[in-house]
Image (cartoon, coloured by chain):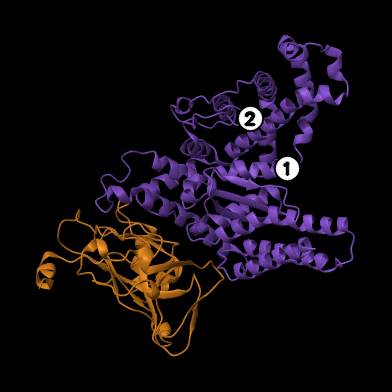
Amino acid sequence: MSTIVHARKRLNAVLSEIDRLKQSEFPYAHPRDGLELLDGMFKKQQSVLGKVSPSAPANVTHNACSTSLYQLHVYVPILGFILRSTNVRNAFEAYPLLLRLAQSVMGTDTKLIVSSEWEFSPFVYRSMTDLPGFVLIGLPAPESSNPLLIPLAGHELGHSVWETERFSAKFEKQIEDGILGELKGNRWQDYLSLYPQSKKSDLDGTDMFVRSTWLPAYTWALLQSEEIFCDFFGLCLFAESYLHAFAYLISPGTSGQRPLRYPNITRRIAHLVDAAKKMAVSVPPGFKSDFADEIEPVEPATKLLVSIADTVSDSLASNLIRLAQDFAKEKTVPTRNLAQVSDIYDKFRKMIVPTSAQQSLTDILNAGWNCDLEPDLWKNVPQVKPEQRDRILRDLILKSMEVSEVHERTMESP
Amino acid sequence: MIIKAAQIARELKNPTNPDDPLVITPRPDLEELQKSGAASVDIRLGCWFLACRPSRTGLLDVYENQADVPSEAKLTKSYYVPFAEGFVLHPKAFVLGVTLEWIRLPADRSAIVIGRSSWGRHGLIIATATGVHPGFTGCLTLELSNIGEIPIMIKPGTTICQIFIHEVAGGDPKLVDRSSFVGRRKPTLGAIELDETAKRLAKG
């Protein structure tokens, strides 16, 4: 009987915590809206548990308790995410412009929570069935005040687009055909060395054992395709600044085992460079050589399947570039304007926040990166001590975003 | 010499030296300034505030070892108030705010920032007149205090103070403000630094 008692106490504890979180100082409405939805969801769970009578069959009690426990596992990390979204370390001035961007690609009802993560990689929470219409993007906590990393949110936004637009469905058949084609063609001898009794015709069947021999390659190829798409989407949205932010956070790599859901870093960079050429985005000098190879798997079956997944996801790269470009074009996302970037850059060099009508997020970030990469920036400006340089540049960038928002709000009809 | 608002508008629109311009962003309404007979420009409240955390410090003693002086992070707590939200300043409360405007002064201009009398009469004062030196660029920290008897709500974007801009004559035009307050978008407490004379006089 203690199971149901524990389950009720667990829910009471999380509801009390939500009450405390509601007293946080929310910089924007959407984190509070998310909290209200989760409050409602947990209260519903509490009500369900309240209806479980002491005489209920054990399986009924267990089902109710395990459902509520599952919800706790899924959503308690989100409560932490919402709490961290209120921390003053975050670059709040960037939020309205990011929200506008998210709404232009995902729909005007989209709600956005930008927070900081205690993981050193940007992150997006996915499939939040109890937070419909929400996009949750986290940047690494030590960098969450750094506007120069905002372009990486473009990659994370790409994941939300991939999911809501069900883009994976466009590639599932191609990926399956590609994997089976590789297995029956170039890789047949390697496959036979692992599964000596196999016949090529077995691969076309529905035998669960046979499918399980190649299914990981299918999963990895699909995940890799998504990651490649997200890189292309980030590049579409943020142009050169995406490449700079990517190199800042990821280069040269951790020299560890490569994560199989991503293309290995060398291929990832090669894809980005190809896409940049097609999108007329300049690749920074030495970009490719900034990254070092990661360790490939050595276990024979994994090695074979990863190599097939790599070949298949590589073959989709051109389609994925087109998909990212077409989608961004359809949603009329503002693209990087070189003349605007140059104008903002000139102003930043004079430590001026641009005064003309609202600037696009992309242009501000590209101008910011151009300044950041200039070794002599403000060296002859007596007001600026070398140790203040980076902080002042970040403040200039964030102030420019805020001023852009002021223009937007004051242009709206009263 | 204090520069009249109409002249400020002209300088904002067409800087006499484009390499060293006077800039106020967001830019005030230049037409209004042209028509105004005033000698100042209204300045708005920004979104960041810095309030003291008295419970974490027993005493601010700058005469001891500088390393022992509590840091800004220990002494204060930051608040971000978005547009359309408000910050309530209670009677006797003291808080640092910041201007919404990013201001850049050329080498031949200085400024004084003071409160607006309409707010002052209701108890809200800018605690000191902030002097802004030639070459300053950034948002200005404002010392806000409610010396009235009722709490006052203030919202970012409100015109809360005014800036008087002066012409600076003489001296080396390359010598400009080198304070650590340059280039900031948030209010800052800053460090109190004693000069050698003060240090010697403070010794027992």
Question: Which residue occupies the extreme top position in the image?
Answer: A189
Q: Is residue B46 above or below residue A282?
A: below
Question: Which residue occupies the foreground of this view, A80 or A247?
Answer: A80
Name the residue rendered at 49%, 59% in the picture: A403
Asked which secondary structure carries label 1, the reply is helix
Q: The chain drawn orange is chain what?
A: B
Give the percent coordinates (x, y) of residue B70.
Answer: 31, 66
Name the residue rendered at 80%, 27% in the picture: A173
Q: Chain of mark 1?
A: A
Name the residue rendered at 24%, 72% in the picture: B61
Asked which secondary structure carries label 2, the reply is loop
10 Å neighbourhood of mark 2: few (<14), some, or many (≥20)? many
Q: Chain of mark 2?
A: A
Question: What is the drawing colour of chain A?
Answer: purple
Closer to the N terminus: mark 1 or mark 2? Answer: 1
Kind of residue indicated by mark 2: Leu
Question: Which residue occupies the foreground of this view, B174 or B144?
Answer: B144
Kind of residue indicated by mark 1: Glu
Q: Quadrant of residue A275?
A: top right
Give the percent coordinates (x, y) of residue A285.
Answer: 43, 28
Question: Which residue occupies the foreground of this view, B77 or A288?
Answer: B77
Q: Is residue A224 above or below residue A366?
A: above
10 Å neighbourhood of mark 1: few (<14), some, or many (≥20)? some
Residue A131 in view, yes or no: no
Residue A134 in view, yes or no: yes
Q: Give the residue pinned by disc 1.
A: A163
Q: Are callouts 1 and 2 both on one chain?
A: yes
Give the percent coordinates (x, y) of residue B33.
Answer: 41, 70
Q: Give the residue pinned by disc 2.
A: A260
